Amino acid sequence: MPEIRLHRAGPRSGLMRLAEADPDFGSPYWARPWGGGLALARHVLDHPGVVAGKTVLDLGAGSGLVAIAAALAGAGAVRAADVDPYAVAATRLNAAANGVAVEAVQGDLTAGAPPEVALMLVGDLFYDADLAARVTVFLERCVAAGIEVLIGDPWRAFLPTGRLRVVAEYPVADFGDPDGAARAAAVFALKA
């Protein structure tokens, strides 16, 4: 995605030193773009009317890729939320590298009330059964509150496909695939 600059982990990035220094480091999923986020960001950039002038929340933002795409495409205000403090830091660094304003916040929003946004963007949160169930219930509450929801995902096993409508498909190299092979990822709208 040439329009967006991201700091990514590589062999010489120093990420291992950070992981060794912090016993709560966890998995650095935010250090590389994943397939659903790539598809969703590409869709937002190619169809700026989806976000134009709207308040947008990127749920499970990781590196901030989707939030940055929304800001570049003309969203009125963009928030990015993630449970990992390193993901929040990565989002802030990546937003600055792209010269866009993104409010990055740490926390699990899925237990709370729907946020005051017009559009929720969700990339790659359906890779684990428990997480997928929790996110699905939260997103259904958001839709019931009048929030539009778009999901980017490469057809993972825990994606609630029966509740979704395919909006677009894109070939992506999903970081979740150990071979890095190109595969189809889709952008979905959550049905009301």
Image (cartoon, rainbow, N blue to C red):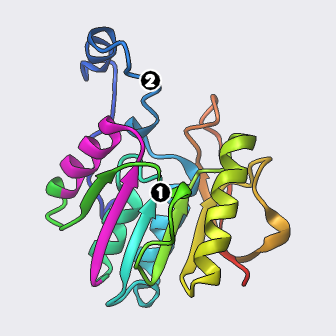
Badge number at residue 146: none
Q: Say what amino acid the circle numbered 1 marks.
A: Leu
User: Residue visible at 35% across and 64% down?
Assistant: 67
In this rendering, the answer to whether 52 lies above or below 2 is below
Q: Is 119 colored magenta in this rendering? A: no
Is residue 148 among what the camera can see?
Answer: yes
Residue located beneath label 2 in the image = 26
Residue found at the very far top of the displayed protein: 20
Query: What segment carries the magenta color?
Result: 76-95
User: Residue visible at 31% across and 35% down?
Assistant: 86
Nearer to me, 67 or 138: 138
| SS assignment at label 1 | helix
> On the picture, is 123 further left or further right than 75?
right
Find residue 17 and report its image quarter.
top left
In this rendering, the answer to whether 43 lies above or below 160 is below
User: Residue visible at 47% across and 79% down?
Assistant: 119
